[in-house]
Image (cartoon, rainbow, N blue to C red):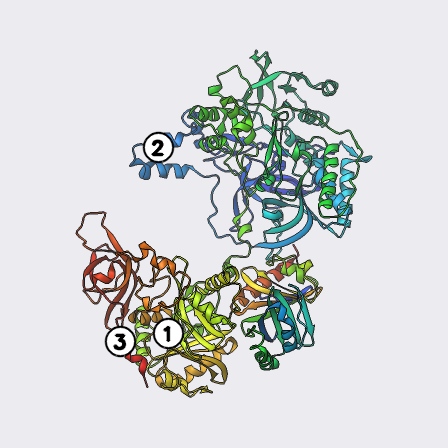
Amino acid sequence: MTEYRVNGRGRVNRDKPIKFTFDDQSYQGFEGDTVASALLANGVHLMGRSFKYHRPRGVVTAGSDEPNALIGTTRGKGRFEPNTRATIQEIYPGLKTESQNKWPSLKFDLGAINDRLYMLFSAGFYYKTFMWPRSFWDSVYEPLIRKAAGLGKAPSEVDPDTYASRYMHCDVLVIGSGPSGIAAALTAGRAGSKVVLVDEAPEMGGTLLSEPSVSIDGQPAWDWLAAAMEELDGMSNVRRMTRTTAIGYYHQNMIGMVQKLTDHMGDVPEGAPRERMWRVRAKEVVLAQGAIERPMVFDGNDTPGVMMAGAAQTFLNRFGVLVGKSPVVLTSHDSAWYTAFDMADAGANVVAIVDTRDSVPQALQDEARARGIPTHPSHTATATKGRLRVSGLRVNPVKNGKVGAEKMLSCDAVLVCGGWTPSLHLFSHTKGSLAWDAEAKAYLPGNKTEDVHIAGAGRGLWGIASALEDGTKAGADAVKSLGGSAGASTFDVADDRKGTGITQKELPTDRSPGRAKAFVDFQNDVTAKDIRLAVREGMKSIEHVKRYTTNGMATDQGKLSNMNGLTIAADALGKEAPQVGLTTFRPPYTPTTFGAFAGYHKGTHFEVTRKTPIDAWAEENGAEFEPVALWRRAWYFPKAGEDMHKAVARECKSTRESVGIFDASTLGKIEVSGPDATEFLNRMYTNPWTKLGVGRARYGLLLGEDGFIRDDGVIGRMRDDLFHVTTTTGGAARVLNMMEDYLQTEWPELKVWLTSTTEEWATIALNGPNARKLLASFVEGADISAEAFPHMSVVECTVGGFPSRLFRISFTGELGFEINVPARHGKALWEKLWEAGQQYDICPYGTETMHVLRAEKGFIIIGQDTDGTVTPQDAGIGWAIGKMKPDFVGKRSLDRPDIVAPGRKQLVGLLTEDPKTVLTEGAQIVDDPKQAKPMKMIGHVTSSYWSEALGRSIAMAVVEGGFDRMEQTLHVPDENGHPVPAKVTGTVFYDPAGDRLKVE
Amino acid sequence: MNAPVNSLDTVTVTILPPVARFNLRIAPADLSVASKAFGLTLPTKIGKGAQNADRAAYCIGPDEWLLHAAEADQQAIAAAFDKVRAKTPHSLVVISDREKTIGITGPAAAELLSVACPLDLSRIPIGGAKRTVFDYAQVVLIRDSEDAFRLEVWRSFVPHVQGLLQIATRELAIGL
């Protein structure tokens, strides 16, 4: 038993002592302790150094709102986490923890020099100080600031943990398991609703865990609590979840919740996920999150040992720990008086109760007197004594606004309560309005935008009885909203601790307020002086004050500081708080790991990798792959000793000389079917389709409403009322969506239906002079001779025994076929062709060779040679526009003045003067490289390759007025910035007459 | 490295054998023609299914049905629809190879699906189906019984979906 542990108090398991370390020193706590409660039990208050001034800091709260006691925790190799709240982290055998922001040690920290210089580090300090000289910013200021910045140290290893996700649906989600939450869950559960009750703590009960002296329905609070838990667990329609934080409240009652699964375990089951993100869709939500205790703002209020009175009460009653043996209570609310009484009853020598109010209920004064506790009403606190631990509180009487003579109260803890702030973070996420309660000086929930009910202290109520009553009412209301009925329960509460109080700006002082280190935001080291300075310097909205001072911008999102900051700013402005505003709370409610958000999306499941039916063959045959949209595609097939350049040159040569085989399965495919299929395609694509015969195919060009090129592909007519449409690989889903959009919203009268068949078919392209020779022996049911099956034809037949849609098309300029077979047969057909193709030295080629071969022919690639600002005319494919058609998507835009104006960027070819130089894709183009900087850039290189067929480099580029610049020499910088001269040409570099398509 | 886990006592994940699969689009007013051609009365409400021996039909859109049949019947079914197309316009597209079917059975089947399917599974009737997503994959989810589901997944998304189901099956086995 340590000297601060109180026998007979608390809920920790005294039979299970647990050893852990803090800054390499071993401490003992018990099962059920947090790091904070266990350290306090050992008399340790000093747990960290503050962010800016490196001031010594101790624990302030007992919960998730903790701003100070942020520690590093190590849960094994690679499992270091900074900024863990000591008040949340449960201890287990072997847990290693450390303090942060100190060097060389927590007790002696050199960074604390900032504290001595604090007059320099006022609000806006960085903005003002590091302005000049400008050149110092990069070299001096920024590196220094970066070095000093940050809270804790970032983990250096890849997170080895796994994280899980789940969806959940329920009738009533109750967030918070204090008395109102439990009452709501009981009421809704008894009515048969599917209820989920969650709490961020390891144990349910909320306030009840800290108030064992209250009795409910004739039972002590903890007995009632146990019975309530038992009843809830006995209902099959109720689920309880502990260690689960509702982090965000999103549209239509979607709640994000993070459940901590293993952080409290010494022995973690192999492979167990660390946390699980729950995405909950609740028909009704009850927010029973309680209230957050407000600190008081006075000089030295951040000294270790100064903490919230409610926290001290929790440490005593829940953990059996006295946070001090001779505490002073400093309060403006009745609640802290009960803390004093509980402390005194547990054996502490309560030095005094200092209350800023002039009137305190007589009953409280009587109880204090009965315990022999001196009381000081109408007093202020003006300073603390002690640096690493508080040793005294300087108090002064206040009479008619005048601060009287000081008095030093020796103590080892100061327990503060500056009132209570309803916890409205989640409600705030819903964009529900907040209403200012002038009497309570607090924001309360106003108009609601979601199916949500707020109960208990979260809407400003106080005392266990009213929380229970309000909770059961919220539960019944939720059931009623669901169309059911539930009777609200009644509760008989005895020894309730009702109470009231006031809130206030920084406490009055007899000293210079300008020298007071009176903290408003502990985590970001913002003082009352900073906030007043911000107002003096012209900030009038709390949003500006917040950003100027960083008040409330730390990881605790101002849970403790926002209302005090607002009160002080409002006072400085001479306005009421609501006129100054309230900053917005945003998810997550408490700091959340990236792992929880990422869930399963790491490693192999980071993102979907789509593979074609032929992918396995490519992998076995040594392909290098590249990602294209979600697909991975064979990029090139290097032989031993080949780099990409050599492999691609060989693949190009083989294809042009004999035959190459290419996996085109990723091309998007859409079945357009119905009596109005032709009319639909006429409206969607620029090209005319009416006269395309069955068994024929045509290049199709798709524009957006703006007239710019969106997609292209070959479209084959299978029947009068059926087209096989192909799209680009990346455009497949987008094009189908666009088509459906027009069909459903613009032309619902058309009888036509669209079905994606991208994955129904595996597609194999054969290209090269020997393509037909290889293919012919496999084809049954069709004549594929040059006469019977000309270029741009399609036929249904069997290939290699598999049902097929066979196209004669070419994206290489060679004789070409694309064979579509049901996906399951893709690899088998590929292997048959591969085997038979050996006599022609068949060559598998990848996307890089495909790119080179098409560029030699001047065929564009959507998204590479176009960028969403290129019209068909700009791309030199105006021929694809059906001139006689009355309309198609984008037609009207093609007549806009800017679209027909001269000087647009147009797609041209570029041939470098030195044929060996390959231009850099994306490089900017200038007319005259000797012009003054900044030069006028007139375009950029879109495609650039080594052409093996031509024995030289080729490139395409978009250039202003490019069509009128033929034969001009332009300049393109190489990777070192040296200008490379290149001549403007047409885009068809190879076989301009198209003779190679006509192989007999 | 953990070996793939496809089953534990409470849930089993398997890739099911292929079926003849069609996407049918037809005006609801003409549904009786389709029912006759398919030999099964097609359901009229989105989410509902109908089944007779190895024929099954699921309504997954206002004018959209997913049809299942024995593989051997694929051509005959296509031919039957072909006959009525001139008089009753519709679109019947073979998608037998577009998807693969993953069967998920056992008392923990619904819990396993809740890992990446946002639907309230308790509201899917037995014999019904819904188009939904499983993580990043568009899927059709069919419910065969209280604890038997099928996921129809586009072929190239199957490894992702199956892998995720394996990860989640392991997670269920751990029981946290």
Q: Are marks 1 and 3 in contact (CB under 8 Å)?
A: no
Left or right: residue A893 compared with residue A741? left
- Callout 1 amino acid: Tyr
- Callout 3 amino acid: Asp
> Which residue is the site of mark 2?
A130
Q: Which mark is residue A991?
A: 3
Instruction: Kindly identify which numbered label has been placed on residue A845.
Output: 1
* Residue A283, x across and y down, in percent: 67, 49
Q: Is residue A518 left or right of residue A29?
A: left
Point out the residue furthest to the right here. A218
> From what the image shows, is residue A382 above or below residue A616?
above
Secondary structure beneath label 3: loop
Q: Amino acid at mark 2?
A: Phe
Label 2 secondary element: loop
**Mark 3 to mark 2 CA distance (whole Å):** 64 Å
- Front residue of this view, candidates A352 and A850: A850
